[in-house]
Image: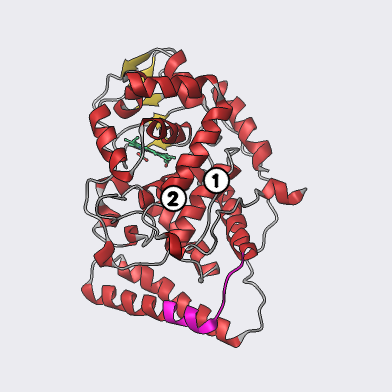
Amino acid sequence: MQAIRSPLRRVALQARLPVVRPRVARPFSTAPEAKSNTTLYLGIAAAVLAGGGYWAYTSSSDTAREVGTVAKSATQAAKAATNFVPSRADYQKVYNRIAETLDEAGEYDDGSYGPVLVRLAWHSSGTYDKETGTGGSNYATMRFEPEALHGANNGLNVARGIMEKIKQEFPWISYGDLWTLGGVAAIQEMQGPKIPWRPGRIDGFAKDATPDGRLPDATQGQDHLRKIFYRMGFNDQEIVALSGAHALGRCHTDRSGFEGPWTFSPTTFTHDYFKLLFDEKWVWRKWSGPKQLADKKTGTLMMLPTDYVLIQDKSFKKYAKAYADNQDLFFKDFSAAFARLLELGVPTAQFVSSEPWELKTLDEQKK
Ligand code: HEM
C-alpha cells in the first residue's frame, strides 16, 4: 500500500491539493506469537511489567524510577531465563509490525509516523562521542530524564510512544534495537534505500544518559555542524548525505519552533531536498519565529540555517551538488552513513552477527 500511497501523496502535494488518503487496510496480526513455552510466557509477563515500569520511569518521582529499574532488571533476568534467542525471522516480524504501524497515523502530520521514527533513530544514536566512547544507540538513554526532556528531543515522546506499543508485543527486543530498527523500517518503507542493520544493543540505565548539547543546533553554521558530526566520527561527505533525511517530515512550532516541510513529498524518501536547495531561490522568512528560509516561488517549503549552509560551504556544496544530480549516489551514501550512525556506541562484540542484515520491505514479502 505504501508504494501506492506515497506517489499519490506526492502528486497531491505538488499540485497543493488536499490529500485524500486511501483507507486500504494492510493485513496484519496483532496476536502475540503462539509458543507453548511456559518460561517464555513468564518472561513476557515480566517484560509487560517492565513496560509499565518504562512509563513509571519517565515520571519524575524517585520511587517510580526505582520501580522502573527493578522491573527492567527483572525483564533482563527473565529474558536470560527463557533462553529465547530471537532469530532473523523474529526481527523481520518486528520490522513488519513497525512498517504496518507507519500507516496507522491517520490525520497525524502528513499521514505517516515514518519521519518522526527516523528522527528518533537518529537522535538516539547521534549523541555518540568518539573520544569518550559515550552516547550512541546502545543504551536507549532517551527513555530517561533529563535526556528525554532535552530541547532537541522535543516531540520525540510521540515516536517513543509508538515504539512502546511495539515493545509490548515483542518484549524481548531491546529499546536500542527497536528504535534503530524503527528508523530502518521507516526509510525502507518510504521508498528509500536498504539500510543494513543488525541487533545487539542492550538497555542501559539513567546513569548512562548523555549531557545536553550533543545534537546539532539548527540556528548555527558550518563550524558547529562540523564540531557535532566530527565528534561522532563523520566527515563532510557523510554530514551532507545524512542531512538528506530532511527530504522527510516537517518542523513543528511546538517542538523546535521552526515550521514546515522541506519537500513536497515529506513521506517519500528522495533526493529532492538537494534538488530544491539548488533549484529554488531561498529567502529569509519574515515572521516572529526563529530564522528560517522559505522558497520564494511558493512560500510553502522551508530550509533551516544548517540546511542552507550545505550550498554555501565549498566542501559541503560539492557533495550536495553530486546528490542533487544523482539520486542513486545519494541513496548509496545515505545508506552507508545511516547504517553507521545506528551502530555508534555499540561494542562490536555485542552484535549477534558479524555482517549486518538487509531486512525485506512489506512489498518484497508479498512477491
Ligand atoms: C544536520 C543537522 C541537523 C539539524 C540541525 C536538524 C534539525 C532538525 C529540526 C529543527 C527538525 C524539526 C523538528 C520538529 O520541529 O519536529 C528536524 C526534523 C527532522 N530531522 Fe533533522 N536535523 C539535522 C540532521 C538530521 C539527520 C542527520 C537526520 C537523519 C538521518 C534527520 C532527520 C530528521 C527528520 C526525519 C525530521 C522530521 C521529523 C518529523 O517530521 O517529525 N535530521 N531536524
Q: Secondary structure at mark 1?
A: loop
User: Residue 171, relative to residue 179: is it above or below?
Assistant: below
Q: Nearer the viewer, residue 69 or 313?
A: 313
Identity of the residue drawn at 68% across and 43% down: 1
CB atoms of marks 1 and 2 within 8 Å: yes
Q: Is mark 1 within 8 Å of ligand 1?
A: no
Judged by its main secondary structure, the magenta piece is helix
Amino acid of disc 2: Leu
N-terminal-most mark, 1 or 2: 1
Q: Which residues are magenta?
A: 75-87
For mark 1, what is the residue?
195
Residue 160 locus on image (x, y percent): 41, 56
Residue 202 locus on image (x, y percent): 41, 66
Q: Secondary structure at mark 2?
A: helix
| Magenta span contains residue 81 | yes
Identity of the residue drawn at 52% across and 64% down: 352
Determine which quarter of the picture holds residue 2. Answer: top right
For mark 2, what is the residue?
342
Q: Nearer the viewer, residue 290 or 308?
A: 308
User: Residue 81, relative to residue 332: is it above or below?
Assistant: below
